[in-house]
Image: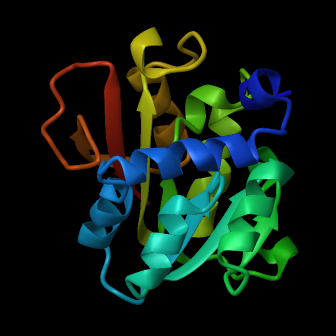
Amino acid sequence: MSRWHELTGGTSGRDYAERFAALARSGKDMHGEARLCAALVPEGARVLDAGCGTGRVMIRLAELGYDCTGVDLDASMLAVARRQAPELPWFQADLTEFEPGELGVPAGFDLVVAAGNIFPLLAPGTEAAVAGRLAAALRPGGLLVAGFGLDEAHLPVPPGITLPEYDDCCAAAGLTLVDRFATWDADPYDGGGYAVSVHRR
């Protein structure tokens, strides 16, 4: 069982969406992830939102002209995403077993984005398998960008993966680190408790 499911029971979609809606109403910028993705690949590129949740990032990328596909295991989160953007392709799938072809979606994505602490909230021991699945979904030269917390101040659970461990998972999947930031606004990484990593296949 994933740490996310242990934390939420798979029923938190509506509450999660409302929390972000409240932040947006307060004037907080909610589109840093989409902005960074848009800086990495050109408009029209194929993007896989792995662990898409309620769709906040993917819906914005679709508005910006990207060809997006969303995948998540949590049905409550996907229900929100489908209500907000029924025209977009949302799939329920376990990232540890993810095969785009089985969903009727061709592999060869230009970019895979894993925002929202996806890797620390996986079932312990499955991180390498997920990195391998996401790498396999990329075209040669495609990018995996993942942002997640590294300490208790940036996570809802105790830390589950270090940056060196994540890099090792990516290397084993045939990915090479090309950039690392401290935020989705591309601030330089300073060794702090949150990192956004960009790896290339």
Residue drawn at x 60%, y 47% is: 18
Asked if residue 2 shows in the view, the reply is: no
Rendered position, 27 above or below 70: above
Task: Please state which of residues 26 and 170 is positioned toward the viewer in this rendering.
Answer: 26
Task: Please state which of residues 81 and 74 is positioned toward the viewer in this rendering.
Answer: 81
Rendered position, 168 above or below 17: above
In percent of width and height, residue 142 lies at: 42, 68
In percent of width and height, residue 47 lies at: 51, 73
In percent of width and height, residue 157 lies at: 60, 15
In percent of width and height, residue 164 lies at: 40, 22
Asked if residue 83 shows in the view, the reply is: yes
In the rendered structure, the answer to whether residue 97 lies left or right of residue 156 reads right
Residue drawn at x 86%, y 27% is: 1
Residue drawn at x 31%, y 48% is: 28
Query: Colour scheme of this structure image?
Result: rainbow
In the rendered structure, the answer to whether residue 196 lies left or right of residue 137 reads left
Give residue 187's quadrant in the image.
top left
